[in-house]
Amino acid sequence: VSANNPIIWQNLTEVGELGTWKVEFSVEGEGGYLEGDLVQEIIDGRNCTEVKAIPDNNYRFVEWGNGSKENPLIVSEVNVDLKVVASFEIASFIITVIEHEGGTITPSSETGQVIVENGTNQAFTVKPNEGHHINNIMIDRNNVPINNDQLFEYTFVNVKKAHTIEASFEIDDFVVKFRSSGNGSLEGETSQIVMYGADASVVKAIPNYGYKFVNWTTDK
């Protein structure tokens, strides 16, 4: 390595003592460790022995201080004191999926967790079951607007932390109205709100004197 070589992160001295140079390897922050001789006294112009960056669980090696991604690293032709720093980052994050009764969020899992690689995008689709509609969507515990209560799509972009997506659903309801065409009356609740799949309460048709009930008709 020469003084102009980009592998040099920090030049500690101008002249080595007795023709040797010190090369120190270290880790910035957390997420991994180094394997090899971390403090080396190198004769002028010689190479260091290799040092390898080992990430911890769910971390990955990013680079050495100058942007080099070579791993393991051998610093060659040393002619200055150096400090060589390795950095790591979290390899993946968890997006927690909370789906309440009445619909689904896709993708999901038995644990309700979707693992997403650091820096990537992850799309989700929310759909209600038959006879239901989307009631509320929360992204990271914040309500988001719903333009279509039968379909909602959301993408987490460039994921760099854990997230949460939550959806709640409601059963559809319908207004059922009963009316007479004349010559009789109705007994019971003539305007009802009925949930999807449920039965309306009984309404009885009572004909006037001299008339008889014929049938019911619907507008469906």
Image: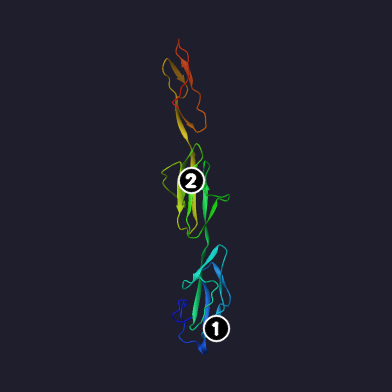
Q: Is residue 112 left or right of residue 152?
A: right
Q: CA distance from mark 2 to mark 1?
A: 60 Å
Residue under pointer 2: 126
> Under tag 2, what secondary structure?
strand
Q: Amino acid at mark 1?
A: Glu
| CB atoms of marks 2 and 1 within 8 Å | no
Of labels 2 and 1, earlier in sequence is: 1
Q: Is residue 97 above or below residue 36?
A: above
Q: Is residue 57 above or below residue 114?
A: below
User: In front here: 140 or 8?
Assistant: 8
Q: Is residue 6 above or below residue 211?
A: below
Residue under pointer 1: 41
Query: Residue at image x 47%, y 42%?
Result: 134
Where's residue 122, x and y in %? 48, 54
> Under tag 1, what secondary structure?
strand
How many marks can you see? 2
User: In front here: 21 or 187?
Assistant: 21
10 Å crowding of disc 1: few (<14), some (14-19), many (20+) = some
Where's residue 125, x and y in %? 48, 47
Q: Which mark is residue 87?
A: none
Query: Residue at image x 47%, y 34%?
Result: 173
Q: Is residue 139 above or below residue 89?
A: above
Where's residue 158, x and y in %? 46, 58
Q: Amino acid at mark 2?
A: Val
- Choose top left, top right, bottom left or bottom right for residue 36: bottom right
Where's residue 120, x and y in %? 48, 58
User: In front here: 161 or 92?
Assistant: 92
Q: Residue furthest bottom?
A: 18
